[in-house]
Image (cartoon, grey):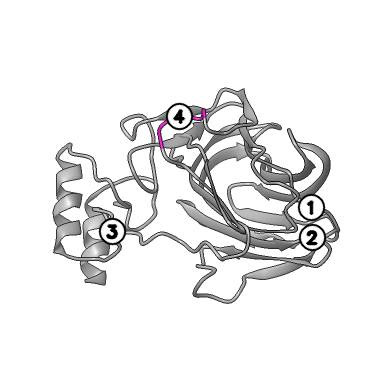
Amino acid sequence: MKYVAQLILPVLLLIGSFFASSSMACTTSQWNGGVTGTPIADSPLAVSRVSGLCAMKLDALGSVTDNSPSVEPTANIRFYVFAQLNSGSPVIFEAFSADDAGGDSLISVTFDGTNFVFDAGDTPSAGVPGTAGWNLVEVAWTGGATMDYWVNADSTLSPATGSVNAAAGTMESVVLGAAGSLDGMITFDDYVSHRTTPVGGLLMGDANGSDTLTIADVIALFNELNGTLATGQPDCNSSGGISIADVICLFNQL
């Protein structure tokens, strides 16, 4: 799913013991639990984005719900979030034990624009610092055991940023957005969930989406600065905007 001042949607891929939700288009229609409020799914001409050509933006209350999880005892979830808040600490992600955000709250993630708090139904984490730009958020949850979380670290490469105890239960639905108070703007992008395998982060600076950093990405970045949008991850420095600073960031990694 993608949001950069835009909103993205998840597409369900049921593959054996593996469920994956990921955004595939500039629409929220694939969130099969529906849409509330006024999320904006749009092109990067109207919003920032992490990857691809669109993302999801909220400048008022709004959320999307996915009922694809089916009595899941574990879940590995990743999304990107960029917040410009004036006040408050909205819940930006929540998972539930019944469809349509019903039953018990199994996971909640709040963000005040500076710090994240992770709660899996027992004792919430202390504040976990984020950044002023795009933040990579990942969780690995097992009902009745623990939930590890990563902030701006790749779950496939880095030790967990922290861990909290998880209350017992199985997952049936998830909600992404800000269904409570919102004073400012939040953008989401590239939501993905797996049953058992870590998701990991995107390769920032991979402007052409080839999964490697080469001079072709520099060309794609220059093309974006001249009006031809890149299809990969052009925001190399995760600032929430594309500029010559991203070209410098990419050169420093080549």
Q: Which residue is drawn at 70% across and 55% down?
A: 117
* Element on which disc 4 rests: loop
Query: Which label's residue is closer to the chain start, 1 or 2?
Result: 2
Quickly name the residue at label 4.
Answer: 27
The location of residue 202, given as percent across then percent down, is 41, 59
- Report how many numbered discs are placed on residues in the image: 4
The residue tagged 2 is: 143
Q: Give the range drawn in magenta.
A: 25-29
Residue 127 falls in image quadrant: bottom right
Query: Residue 204: x, y in percent?
Result: 35, 59
* Pointer 1 residue: 170
Rate crowding at label 2 as few (under 14), some (14 to 19) or many (20 or more) other CA atoms within 10 Å.
many
Which label's residue is closer to the chain start, 1 or 4?
Answer: 4
Report if the CB atoms under discs 1 and 4 are less than 8 Å apart: no
Residue 26 colored magenta? yes
Q: Nearer the viewer, mark 3 or mark 2?
A: 2
The mark nearer the N terminus, 2 or 4, is 4
Q: Is the magenta stretch mostly helix, strand or loop?
A: loop
Residues at badges 1 and 2 in contact (C-beta under 8 Å)?
A: yes
CA separation in Å, label 1 and label 4: 28 Å
Q: Mark 3: which amino acid? A: Asp
What residue does disc 3 label?
Answer: 206
Q: What residue type is labelled 4?
A: Thr
Q: Which amino acid does label 1 sit on?
A: Thr
Residue 115 point in image, percent of width and height: 63, 55
